[in-house]
Amino acid sequence: MMDDHPVLASDFNGLTRAQPSLPASWYRDPDHFEKELRHVFARNWVYLCRAESLPEPRAYRTFRVAGQPILVIRDRDGRLQGYFNTCRHRGSILCTEPEGKLNKYLITCPYHQWVYDLTGRLRGTGPMRDVAGFDKEDYLLLRVSLAEWGGFVFVNLDPDAQDFETLFGAETGYVANWPLTDMRVGHNYTKVLNCNWKVFWENFNECLHCPNIHPELSDLVPIYGRAIMARRDDPNWKEHADDDTPPIGGGLREGAQSWSMDGSALGRLPGLTDEDVETGQRYVTIVPSVFIAHHADYVRSVQITPLTPQTMQLSVDWLFHPEMMNAPDFDMEPIVTFGKIVLDQDGAASELNQAGMASERFERGVLMQEEYEVFLFQDWVRRQLGVPPLGAPPTSRASRRAEIED
């Protein structure tokens, strides 16, 4: 529970006292950036792609995760397999294109023609003669842990990785009624931001900026216009405990149904209940690489990929149900346009934040009462890097959310 954390208030969502922010050098320094790649992105579950982008056996995609070359391929039985995109002979890249489909159920190294089947077993060594001391069984492809949830594909480079379901079962259970596996990408929006990856996450984790940065969103979700995210972010929430109007209790403005330009929805996704959609949005966060917003009629995934200490890539997918997409009056433009407005505002604010941290005199910032989620995120980063935390282990967003909604 939130009150188990010594710097979090027990009777509302907030910090009991100001907390130091992360050092500014952590947002600029190349050596520290490499440390974060090794200890954060190489040791946690990282989102790669939708499973639908590998639609059939022999389809493959290549990625770089924490600077490492990764290959994901669909095998003969339709299962996704994850490997380092590295030949066991002398280390050549195996698949050179970002995506494609193999001609055979074999992966052939383009350098010396070593051949592997799609389960990673070495089947041939090209023109090389047999030699004493060599056993093919010792040279399987180097596997990476792979998990698929709701059509979202994740990998973990840590050989001792904890099971995805064990870590995120409570988080993903919160959106169990959404037909995620059946949904398909209707639109993608990708751009490079001039900010450190942590800056964008920190922006996501507070709404102090909402009234100033997001006028359209604050109009749609009135509680955001109060610079808070949930009812219990207000220290005096008990005085209004019986008031369920959107500015106090959360949810969309009166008459709105979804995040779109006019608040209208395309309908309701199959399987959703009134309780599922009453708040207007439900989030699943899988740090460090993605958060997924669930609405009544669509789902939006926001992927965060670090590029350099001061740049990152944002890749956003809007997912719709095929029945909805096949309807003659299907129009995602009001949804996508609204989403881009909000994302571009977040991006501009994050770049503003990053630019200011270029100051040599700015050593670190301070976190105020409302920035409890930013604190928990920064505490998580400290733990990943082996830096002594400022408090006790943070609980999951799902459990905090459940407490908020009690």
Image (cartoon, rainbow, N blue to C red):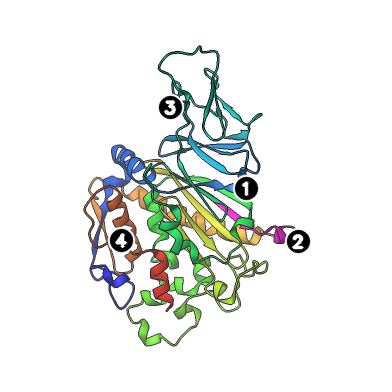
Mark 4: which secondary structure? helix
Start-end of magenta stretch: 313-328
Q: Amino acid at mark 3?
A: Asp
Q: Could you give the CA–CA distance between mark 2 and mark 3, rounded to whole angstroms?
A: 53 Å
Q: Amino acid at mark 2?
A: Ala
Which residue is tagged 2?
327
The first of marks 3 and 1 along the sequence is: 1
Q: Quadrant of the N terminus?
A: bottom left
Does the magenta segment cover residue 334? no
Residue 233 in the image, given as x and y percentages of width and height? 36, 74
> Which residue shows up at 27% across the image and 73% down it?
9
Which residue is tagged 3?
138
The first of marks 1 and 4 along the sequence is: 1
> Which residue shows up at 46% across the image and 27% down it?
137
Residue 79 in the image, given as x and y percentages of width and height? 58, 44
Q: Amino acid at mark 1?
A: Glu
